[in-house]
Image (cartoon, grey):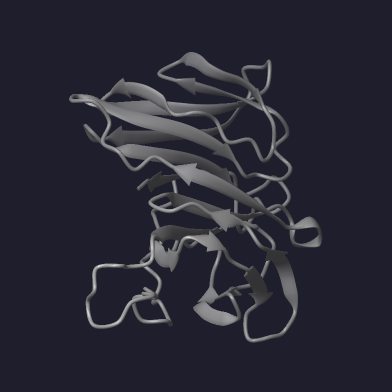
Amino acid sequence: MRQLCGILVLLAAAFVMSACGGGDGNATPQTRLRVLHASPDAPNVDVYADGAKVLANVPYPALSQYLSLPAGQHRIQVNAAGTTTTVIDVSPTLVANTAYTAIAAGFLANIEPLLATDATTAAPSGQARLRVIHASPDAGPVDVLVNGQVVLSNVAFGAISNYLSVPAGTYTVEVNAAGTSTTAITASVTLAAQSNYSAVAIGSVKTAGTNPLALKLLTDG
């Protein structure tokens, strides 16, 4: 399993906006958004929110910190780094007091955004929550096994599963070609109690020499 990339520098310091001045208590409701570069053949990218560059020169497969934004609709653009070439241009409505992960997924020629709503409340005592996101563009449908048991079947590219509650601990997660015993990814993941995670299948068969199939574990919320 690839190690998580280092935290990216936010170019808009804190990127927190408030509608009030002088501390009158009417702070604008906030939402949070982070970005994962999961397009295995795409160059480094810049990310813009409402026309302001908030992340620069993001490499595959980096994950940003959460950006804090006013709740509501925002225009999110992803450009090839240092250019005006926009490869993703979407305007999602982000709900107050909610956290999201935006994933740039697919090969560059057909790159697309995936938007996942992240769990922010603690998992029950002694438990962890884990979901799976299929962001590998040419792996085909997959089955996901945890400690040898199938927990998700025939998961298509772009799918975002519900969270599964499991006892905290260390697990072997396998990603198999759907309906077969052919394992494409094997990873050991350690899940802490009362925490939430996304296991994201990234990489591709096509780019196996540089960006092979792998599982990237994100801590959510």
- State the count of labels: 0
Q: Quadrant of residue 84?
A: bottom right
The image shows residue 164 at horizontal and vertical percentages of: 42, 24
The residue lying furthest to the top in this view is 149
Asked whether 215 or 53 is in front, the reply is 53
Q: Is residue 88 above or below residue 127?
A: below
Q: Is residue 57 above or below residue 60?
A: below
Asked whether 158 or 98 is in front, the reply is 98
Residue at 44%, 66% in the rendered image: 70
Q: Is residue 12 left or right of residue 209?
A: left
The residue lying furthest to the right in this view is 109
Residue at 33%, 21% in the rendered image: 166
Residue at 67%, 75% in the rendered image: 79
Quadrant of the image containing the N terminus: top left
The image shows residue 53 at horizontal and vertical percentages of: 54, 81
Q: Is residue 165 above or below residue 55?
A: above
Q: Is residue 83 left or right of residue 187?
A: right
Q: Is residue 158 above or below residue 182?
A: below
Residue 215 seen in render: no
Residue at 52%, 15% in the rendered image: 150
The image shows residue 90 at horizontal and vertical percentages of: 69, 62
The image shows residue 193 at horizontal and vertical percentages of: 21, 32
Residue 36 seen in render: yes
